[in-house]
Image (spheres, rainbow, N blue to C red):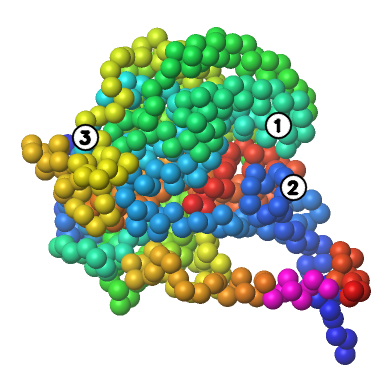
């Protein structure tokens, strides 16, 4: 009888027939898993037999937490969902709450929201391209992408004081107006950025190694992509024309002119091309924002106060019926009836949906976050079956997942 | 309105299973009996081209009151990319028997969403390929999104206690497994 200490190991007998199988736990601390994602793999040589992603390492219980905070207090939670594109999450959350509580948003605030959304889309796509290329082995692209991303993050810092956790939107508008300095810098960025995209493309677009690592890898047909509930560029790469900005316009997207790029083949290369075109389209939207920016207030008159004055006029509290909090509304409209709403927005990763149930109080009765990353990682076990380990890394990269959003 | 038309068609097809049709802020919800849920989803997918499953989540109705409301409900949000219509389906589930049919065979993507609903609310899905906890640990006690589950508990998760004990035990070994001499 041998007694083992904690650090000694013992050979576990392998069932006959399974001698060639190798069990590998990829992650959660692995540079190519984009955060704390663990993938349990059963391998035959280098081929993956079964692929079982494990999530939850970053679970913070936002849905439970949200039920105990007011609508306004929950805005900060949304920063911590997709921390790479926090602005899009802020906008998605506020759009949903405003639809639920019927709060009007002024035109200028809507345009500012579109502006920060597209800025965060560019910044998120740049980070995606940088890390995806780095995973596949193209180191240079990483440095080029971070050069432009830095400009955008500096602009966010100038706009609202934070580079990543922005909390920029308010119920009924946005927090800060843009200054002339920001618009000037943004104008220069928009002017220079198309040349930068071309620069990235010269690095990898026809690079033989890049092509070999992406073409035909992680291929999903349009039917399969819908079956797996993929959204965003991962779905459009398979040729399905589904962009919420076009299908269910929010925040005034119907006024903008832009194309929705779709791929045909549904492989990693097609999704890469889609996102590169989206960078161009976002830049085009930013150009329109600069030209069309209307004057006016940035916060609607119905907006509830976030700061708590001594005698609150529009204060939202947890156990007070919400209609007492927004006194400017109740005179002519019965807005705080019980009910539910599902509002989806197009964030860089895909479709971010907020499902709310209101029981008329100042906090949501139930808030469900439909996060694209969670569903994309769920699709990994289907997409990763039968491929090589190196291709699995490419697939994780091409799905563009963020674990903060996945685990909530 | 197109959504209401679909809801009415469903009411004719599944007499008795559609408990009610609710319109709120332009979004149509149908309350359904859980026994016909799978067939309704199937009809929506094939006949009405609702090929995209937006959202699937569970709700605890403990503190809500209303007609036909049971303790739990599972909410399905569908969208038709071709016809640009959406519809929400809510299946009512009693507390005594929190079981509903899985729609994983219609949408593979529903797999994880149903696992999440099971994990956080304890609703069991029939015919699900792998119904295990997903966001919380395997040995987690209770279902966090139920209304009686406290926001702040009074004790730590037992896995954390075990990890701490193990860390104390392993402190006397160095990286290569040799015992560190006590000073």
The residue beneath circle 1 is A133
Establish if B148 lies above or below A331: below
Q: Are marks 2 and 3 on the same chain?
A: yes
Q: Residue at x 51, y 24 (%)?
A: A158
Queried whether the magenta region covers residue B171, the answer comes back as yes
Tell me how far mark 2 sits from mark 3, CA to CA.
54 Å
Q: In x, y percent, where is residue A196?
A: 64, 15
Q: Quadrant of the N terminus of chain A?
A: bottom right
Is A41 displayed left or right of B126 in the figure?
right
Is B76 displayed left or right of B131 in the figure?
left
Magenta stretch: helix, strand or loop mostly: helix
Chain of the residue on which disc 3 is drawn: A
Quadrant in which residue A45 is drawn: bottom right
Q: Residue at x 82, y 67 (%)?
A: A19
Q: Nearer the viewer, residue A210 or B26?
A: B26
Give, as a single range, the part of the protein colored magenta: B165-172
Q: In x, y percent, where is residue B46?
A: 35, 46
Tell me how far mark 1 sits from mark 2, CA to CA.
16 Å
Q: In x, y percent, where is residue A126?
A: 61, 27
The residue beneath circle 2 is A389
Establish if B46 lies above or below B92: above
Q: Are marks 1 and 2 in contact (CB under 8 Å)?
A: no
Crowding at mark 3 (Cα within 10 Å: few <14, some 14-19, many 20+)? some
Residue found at the far front of this picture: A310
Tell me which numbered mark, 1 or 2, is placed earlier along the sequence: 1
Q: Nearer the viewer, residue B148 or B60?
A: B148
Crowding at mark 1 (Cα within 10 Å: few <14, some 14-19, many 20+)? many
Does residue A127 appear in this view?
Answer: yes
Q: Residue at x 89, y 75 (%)?
A: B182
The residue beneath circle 3 is A302
Queried whether the magenta region covers residue A227, the answer comes back as no
């Amino acid at each position: 009888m041998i007694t083992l200490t904690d650090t000694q190991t013992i050979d576990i007998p392998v069932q006959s027939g399974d001698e060639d199988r190798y069990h590998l736990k990829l992650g959660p601390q692995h540079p190519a898993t984009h955060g704390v994602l663990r993938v349990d793999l059963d391998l035959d040589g280098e081929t993956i037999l079964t692929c079982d992603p494990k999530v939850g390492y970053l679970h913070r219980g936002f849905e439970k937490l949200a039920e105990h905070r007011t609508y306004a207090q929950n805005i900060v939670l949304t920063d911590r969902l997709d921390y790479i594109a926090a602005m899009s999450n802020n906008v998605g959350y506020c759009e949903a709450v405003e639809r639920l509580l019927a709060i009007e948003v002024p035109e200028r605030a809507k345009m500012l929201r579109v502006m920060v959304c597209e800025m965060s889309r560019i910044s998120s796509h740049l980070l995606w391209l940088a890390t995806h290329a780095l995973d596949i082995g193209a180191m240079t692209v990483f440095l080029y992408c971070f050069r432009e991303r830095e400009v955008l993050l500096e602009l966010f810092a100038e706009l609202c004081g934070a580079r990543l956790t922005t909390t920029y939107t308010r119920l009924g508008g946005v927090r800060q107006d843009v200054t002339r300095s920001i618009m000037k810098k943004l104008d220069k960025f928009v002017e220079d950025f198309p040349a930068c995209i071309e620069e990235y493309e010269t690095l990898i677009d026809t690079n033989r190694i890049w092509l070999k690592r992406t073409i035909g890898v992680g291929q999903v047909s349009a039917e399969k992509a819908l079956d797996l509930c993929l959204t965003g560029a991962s779905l459009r790469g398979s040729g399905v024309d589904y962009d919420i900005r076009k299908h269910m316009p929010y925040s005034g997207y119907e006024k903008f002119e832009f194309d929705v790029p779709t791929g045909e083949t549904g492989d990693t290369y097609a999704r890469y091309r889609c996102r590169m075109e989206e960078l161009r389209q976002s830049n085009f939207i930013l150009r329109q924002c600069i030209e069309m920016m209307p004057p006016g207030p940035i916060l609607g008159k119905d907006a509830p106060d976030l700061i708590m004055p001594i005698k609150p006029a529009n204060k939202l509290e947890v156990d007070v019926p919400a209609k007492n909090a927004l006194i400017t509304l109740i005179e002519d409209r019965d807005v705080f009836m019980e009910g539910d709403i599902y509002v989806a927005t197009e964030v860089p990763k895909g479709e971010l949906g907020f499902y709310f149930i209101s029981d008329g109080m100042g906090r949501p009765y139930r808030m469900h976050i439909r996060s694209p990353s969670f569903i994309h990682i769920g699709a990994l076990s289907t997409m990763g079956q039968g491929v090589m380990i190196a291709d699995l890394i490419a697939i994780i990269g091409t799905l563009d997942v963020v674990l903060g959003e996945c685990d909530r | 309105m197109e959504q209401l038309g679909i809801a009415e068609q469903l009411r004719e097809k599944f007499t008795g299973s559609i408990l009610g049709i609710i319109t709120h802020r332009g979004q149509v919800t149908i309350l359904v009996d859980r026994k016909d849920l799978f067939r309704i989803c199937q009809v929506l997918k094939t006949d009405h081209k609702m090929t995209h499953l937006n959202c699937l989540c569970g709700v605890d109705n403990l503190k809500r009151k209303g007609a036909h409301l049971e303790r739990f409900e599972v909410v399905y949000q569908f969208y038709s990319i071709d016809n640009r219509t959406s519809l929400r389906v809510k299946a009512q589930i009693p507390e005594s028997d929190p079981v509903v049919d899985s729609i994983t065979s219609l949408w593979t993507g529903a797999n994880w969403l149903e696992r999440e609903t099971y994990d956080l609310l304890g609703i069991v899905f029939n015919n699900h390929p792998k119904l295990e906890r997903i966001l919380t640990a395997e040995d987690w006690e209770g279902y966090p999104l139920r209304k009686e589950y406290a926001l702040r508990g009074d004790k730590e998760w037992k896995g954390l206690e075990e990890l701490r004990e193990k860390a104390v035990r392993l402190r006397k070994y160095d990286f290569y497994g040799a015992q560190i001499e006590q000073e």
